[in-house]
Amino acid sequence: MNMAEERVNILLIEDDEDDFVITRDLLNEIGPDKYHLDWVDSVEKGRRQLQAGRHDVYLIDYRIGQSTGLELLREAHDHGVDAPMILLTGAKEHEIDIAAMKAGAADYLIKGQINAPLLERSIRYSMEQARHLRELRDRDAQLMQAQKMEAVGRLAGGVAHDFNNLLTAITGYTELLLSRLGEDNELSNDVQEIKRAAERAASLTRQLLSFSRKQVILPKVLDLNTLVSDVERMLQRLIGEQIRLLTDLETQPLPILADPGQIEQVVMNLAVNSRDAMPRGGTLTIGTERLEAGSDRIPGECRLSGNAVALLSVCDTGLGIDSSTMGHIFEPFFTTKGPDKGTGLGLSTVYAVVKQIGGDIKVNSEVGQGTRFDLYLPLAHQAAATLRETMPQPPKPRINATLLLVEDQNIVRKLMRRLLQAEGYTILEAPHGQEALRIARAHSGPIDLLVTDVVMPEMSGQQLARELGALRSDLRVLFVSGYADSDIYHEIAGQGPGHFLQKPFTPDILSRKIRDILTDGHP
């Protein structure tokens, strides 16, 4: 608190009215506009005032009726009162001084020796000490929160890695079943449900990887409208039936260059934030719109380079955000929710993702009237890439190539071998790096492509690629993994664009990725 600007509220807990008058006169001598003094004359009244927490400083007498101020100090300290408490006593006794400090007193003053400068010095010292202690506790709490998030993040990353291996197998074998059954088979609908469940599970693992900071960032041109429509199916279950979900999407495509998993996470984080702001229900509206450069609807601080921007808005009818909170909402670990209800990472992640793709964000809110987040995202120059995965592909000519497949998960390796052999490739396979090196040394013919998992026991995919690269300088590499740390991904990216495949993947995506690498992207 800045004492030069704000009046300090002080409570005196003292059963002697004469001491109240003396204390009041001393404070008036210091300056009547600096301090406001309240007085209670019993332990019970003092206890209620301490619990209410309406005062900045508490002056507590050592003797209050049949009780002692020390007992009140200990009780207040145990109940988390963090305002400074100063013990007053009639005699200088070293034992009481020590006991007062142990009980949580900020200072210790002897009646009869107190003058105005001494009292003000004690109040100032106590308040400054309390402020430093609060800051220290806040930093300790943030450190503990960060350590907890790091530990949970490591666990989430490991779970997602293992889960993605299983989902790769489920997705792959489901695709194989569908290709054999045909659309008219009565079992096709059941298999489609399995496929959709696997897709929803894959979405959950993407969230886990985003949370644990082990999500590989793979930007591509995508249509913002399509992404919002896809996420909408999950949002209603996420926000609950008491909240009405509306979407108002631009009629024309809005191509942006971004990682789809990250943009999904942005929308979901904002939706969760709105849900928590509407505990009694309300309306959540998600909209998209194209804004031309120079539009007066783009705030000056949010103007982006380029001809136009995509506006993604998330609006709720919730509690709103007060002005004191607004300045902190994007800070990591800042949260107004309870200890078990918020991590303080949701909005900071939104801010980081938007800035990373060259966008900007603005928030408008009024207490009791709701909140609106406007995300201004640069539009991509090309749109064809968004259609690539859904457009029918022409018949693929057979490529005669030898692939070295290295994967420590048997179920995934068997699936990939089956899929690639069906494409006409010659497959050499190994369950780990050392076996792959032995096979490569023994194989007299060419090896056109190494397809390797990243995270394997004994030898990582990167180590294997380096050692095989020394033996075969023209070897091309496709890295496959359920997750990768940013340092690992930067190393992988050195192999060239498009040389990473995120699990889980479909047979068609695997086939296309390998074909692109073998033909340098020119079928």
Image (cartoon, rainbow, N blue to C red):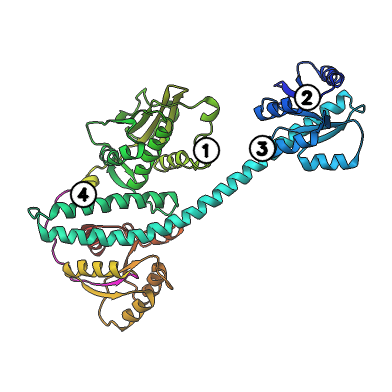
The location of residue 350, given as percent across then percent down, is 43, 40
Q: Which residue is at a point 40% across and 58% down the rendered structure image?
A: 159
| Magenta segment | 389-408
Question: Which residue type carries mark 1?
Answer: Gly
Can you give x and y, in whole percent of width and height, for residue 401 in the image?
21, 71
The tag earlier along the polypeptide, 3 or 4, is 3
Q: Real-space Cα distance between discs 3 and 1?
A: 16 Å
Q: Earlier in the sequence, mark 4 or mark 1?
A: 1
- Which label's residue is closer to the chain start, 3 or 1? 3
Three-letter amino acid code of the residue under disc 4: Arg
The residue shown at (51%, 55%) is 151
Residue 486 appears in the rendering: no
Q: Earlier in the sequence, mark 4 or mark 2?
A: 2
Q: Nearer the viewer, mark 4 or mark 1?
A: 1
Give coordinates of residue 341: x percent, y percent. 48, 40
Q: Quadrant of the C terminus?
A: bottom left
What residue is shown with label 4?
Answer: 388
